[in-house]
Image (tube, grey):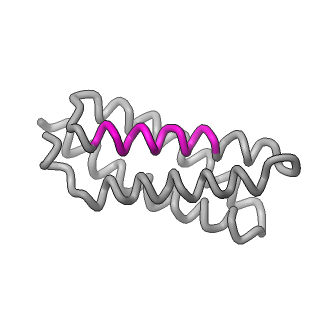
Amino acid sequence: MAHQIPQSSVDIAVHCAYECEHCADKCLGSMAECARLCIDCADMCWASAAYMSRGSRFIPQILKSCIEICEACASECEKHDAEHCQKCAQACRRATEEYRKVANIAGVE
């Protein structure tokens, strides 16, 4: 299954985790809820990249949770005008789209 998931899907997960980590760092101390959601989202995106890389049979379940967390993170970040929040929200939205595609592929297998 690992090679059935495109490298670009893993790259999108890593990019989302990266943007979330950066946003969390910038929001610490000033926007606690944003920072918390970004940390949760980054952790799930790093995990999702790993699960997809190794073709785990649990990809659909992991991505379902990750989609929920990415959507919450994007919604929170979209409330803020800071550039890092907007980049994070965009990365989360893109990751959510990709995770839905991958979950459908992985769920059929």
Q: Which residue is drawn at 62% across and 48% down?
A: 73
Q: Residue at x 76, y 57 (%)?
A: 26
Overall secondary structure of the magenta stretch?
Answer: helix
When asked about the image quadrant of residue 103, the answer is top left
Q: In this view, does 13 lie to the left or right of 23?
A: left
The stretch of residues the image draws in magenta is: 39-52
Residue 92 picture location, percent across and down: 52, 56
40 within the magenta span: yes
9 within the magenta span: no
| Residue at the limit of the structure toward the right, as seen here | 30
Residue 93 picture location, percent across and down: 50, 59
Residue 83 picture location, percent across and down: 71, 71
Q: Residue at x 51, y 61 (%)?
A: 91
- Total labels: the figure holds 0
Q: Is residue 109 left or right of residue 27?
A: left
Screen quadrant of the C terminus: top left
Screen quadrant of the N terminus: top left
Q: Which residue is drawn at 80% across and 48% down?
A: 28
57, above or below 19, in the image: above
